[in-house]
Image (cartoon, grey):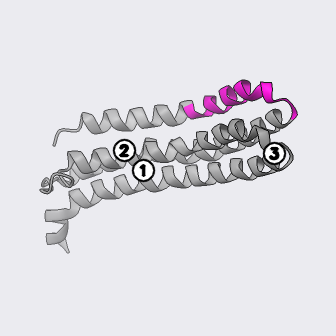
Amino acid sequence: MTEFFAQWGGLSLALFGAGIAVVLGGLGSAYGVSTAGQAGAGVTTEHPEKFGKVLVLEALPGTQGIYGFLIGFLVLLFTGILGGEAKDLTMAQGWQIFFACLPAGFTCLVSGIQQGKVSAAGMNMVAKDAAQAGKAMVLSAMVETYAVLGFLISALLIFFIKL
């Protein structure tokens, strides 16, 4: 077991961090898009002509999954997995990459869920007055800010880890 950790422990930790970013971002988006989609189904049942405005609001919480995916992609790229030859990472480097993935993972999880709720509330605005769609999008996009910040911190941390 110690031989495994000596040879693969650092890389395993890095890949586990990448997996956390991807999974948590995906979970946040799946939950958020689902919440918004349920509200959108109700709106479009009564007002089919508002589908385009509702669709944009439903899509907004889906971006957190993309941010988590991009962090996972960066880890795979920087560790050499995508190049076909994985780098020999120390345990310290593995832990650094693992912890670098956490800001994106957790902010994307929480903001995806919450953005779905704000998007669903925005759909209620659109149901009453289609002219309110822009305001609903701005309200939903405000939640997105925190996913973007988590993504940026994770990306910057990964870029500055010396491998």
Q: Residue at x 17, y 51 (%)?
A: 80
Sequence order check: which comes first, mark 1 or mark 3? Answer: 1
Q: Which residue is mark 2?
A: 71
Span shown in magenta: 128-144
Magenta stretch, main secondary structure, is helix
Left or right, residue 49 beside residue 2: right
Q: Check the image and report above or below for 67 versus 45.
A: above
| Residue in the foreground of this view, choosing between 90 and 30 | 30
| Residue in the foreground of this view, choosing between 51 and 82 | 51
Q: Amino acid at mark 3?
A: Val
- Pinpoint residue 34: horizontal percent, then vertical percent: 66, 54
- Pinpoint residue 60: horizontal percent, then vertical percent: 60, 39
Look at discs 1 and 3 and give the one toward the viewer.
3
Q: Secondary structure at mark 2?
A: helix
Q: Amino acid at mark 1?
A: Ala
Q: Is residue 2 magenta?
A: no
Q: Secondary structure at mark 3?
A: helix
Sequence order check: which comes first, mark 2 or mark 1? Answer: 1
**Quarter residue 11 falls in:** bottom left
Q: Check the image and report above or below for 84 versus 64.
A: below
Left or right, residue 24 beside residue 132: left
Q: Secondary structure at mark 1?
A: helix
- Most extreme residue toward the front is 49
**Crowding at mark 1 (Cα within 10 Å: few <14, some 14-19, many 20+):** many
Q: Which residue is mark 1?
A: 21
Q: Amino acid at mark 2?
A: Ile
Q: Which residue is mark 3?
A: 43
- Pinpoint residue 150: horizontal percent, then vertical percent: 46, 36
Kindly report the distance in space between the C-alpha atoms of the residues bearing marks 3 and 2. Answer: 35 Å
**Quarter residue 111 falls in:** top right
